[in-house]
Amino acid sequence: MNRQQSKENFQGEGLRFPDGFVWGTATAGHQVEGGNIASDWWAWETLGLVEDGTKSGRAVDYWNRFEEDHALMASFGLKAFRLGIEWSRIEPERGKIDKDAIARYHEIFQSLRRHNIKICLTIYHWVLPVWIAKQGDWLNPATLCHLEDFAKLVIDEFGEYPDLWITINEPMVPAVAGNLLGLFPPQRRSLRHYRSIVKALLKAHACLYELIHKRVPLAPDGGSTKVGVAQAYPCVEPWGSGGFRGLYEKVMTPLVRYLAYGAWDRAILSGCSGLFGIGGKNRQLYDSYDFCGVNYYFRMSLRFDGSKREQFYIDESGMPDGIIGTDMGWQIYPEGLYGMLEHIWRRFKRPIYITENGIADSGDDLRPAYILRHVAQVYRAIEAGIPVKGYYHWSFIDNFEWREGFAKKFGLIEVDHADDTLLRKPRPSAELFGEITKNNGLTRDMVQKYAPEALEEIFGTMNDE
Ligand code: IFM
């Protein structure tokens, strides 16, 4: 943010958030549970396609160590947790329900309750049972019927627990990475398939939204049930080259935004989509968000690159001067979060939860400032009248990072996979995030202690006055 903005918004000894603001952390089943072997991702991993040569395997064994992990969360004062449920775990073969897996999820939810940790539950976070994948995954219309059966079971079994429901995590990612760019399973590279997958996921979301509302009218706090999607909102901007290159970058920018999130959002807002072949106004789809879930990580600056034919001549990995990159090579750009929140609020007029925000940073060198700077942008948005209701940090613990394997470290809690005991080691950022949670905001002392380099940005020019 610029100096003037920071003066207006962040003067004082701290940034105190509204009462009831939800502070939590996030994970997804396949990335932490371990042993999710009846899934399409596991099948793909066994082909040796993960970049660092790892496989999800036992992940961090959350499946068996959830109690220890929840106690750790509680020790840091964390009040909310976003987790996923794995379809392939509950229904590893068509029609065969694993009663032990259901019992285990009950234990997990009950343990969270005992620790007074609110639950945000994701139903579909990119992973399908292998039997569904073999039938043509989302390209097969029967998948939607199977999903409906699975969802009824999940909702009836576990409906009493979630304070927030996420139907789908980042729907455009499996569509783009798995079906347009061929980077994730099932490794298709086709615009036609990308469109079909998004259409199927829109229908899946609408179906889940309606089912949850029908079967669980009230949330645990007695208020109405809240259902949404966790959408990936990268900040997409042109690199700013000159001449033809610059023109190409400018033209591609809205297109990439549209493919990355805009087309989906529009389908929700209008109930129809020319691009995805949903005609008329689909009643089930229209306006099917109670809140907007925002996953924000980085900015990408689109630069023309004539050699990148397979990426439509765009290189998005460049690092502009003065911008720091994460271990994923992503630009750290907190201002982009504020911009996205404004954009989303303008479009949806719905309460917003930051359902993911985080950084791969094995040394925990950049994470404290990353957290503080992004939380400050959330505060700035709230001050500007945007109803942001919660913030979930990704991730609670080092996770299996899909194509990148275990090499990329997103956790507040460190786990070394070379160590058989999978010992949990809190990083300094876990302490910081715990302090933010306990204080319901951030203070000058915290910034001074964890990331003094961010003082000026967050608190402006107090020292010069
Ligand atoms: O690990 C992922 C998560 O599964 C979805 N959102 C982005 C995270 C970091 O890449």
Image: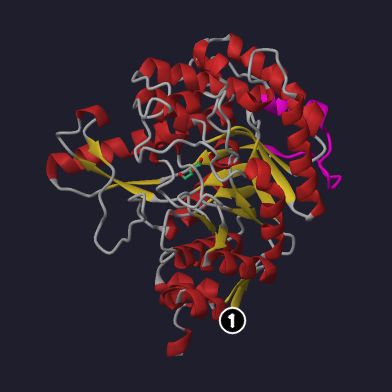
Out of 364 and 372, give the one closest to the viewer: 364
Whether residue 456 is visible here, answered yes or no, is yes
Colour theme: secondary structure
Q: Magenta segment, which residues?
A: 208-227
Residue 372 in the image, given as x and y percentages of width and height: 51, 67
At horizontal 70% and vertical 64% (from top left) the residue drawn is: 75
Mark 1: which secondary structure?
A: loop
Q: Is residue 75 left or right of residue 377?
A: right
Out of 444 and 53, give the one closest to the viewer: 53
Image-quadrant location for residue 219: top right
Residue 307 in the image, given as x and y percentages of width and height: 15, 33
Whether residue 291 is visible here, answered yes or no, is no
Of all residues, the one furthest to the front in this rendering is 420
The reply to whether the magenta stretch includes residue 214 is yes
Report the number of numbered marks: 1
Tag 1: amino acid: Glu
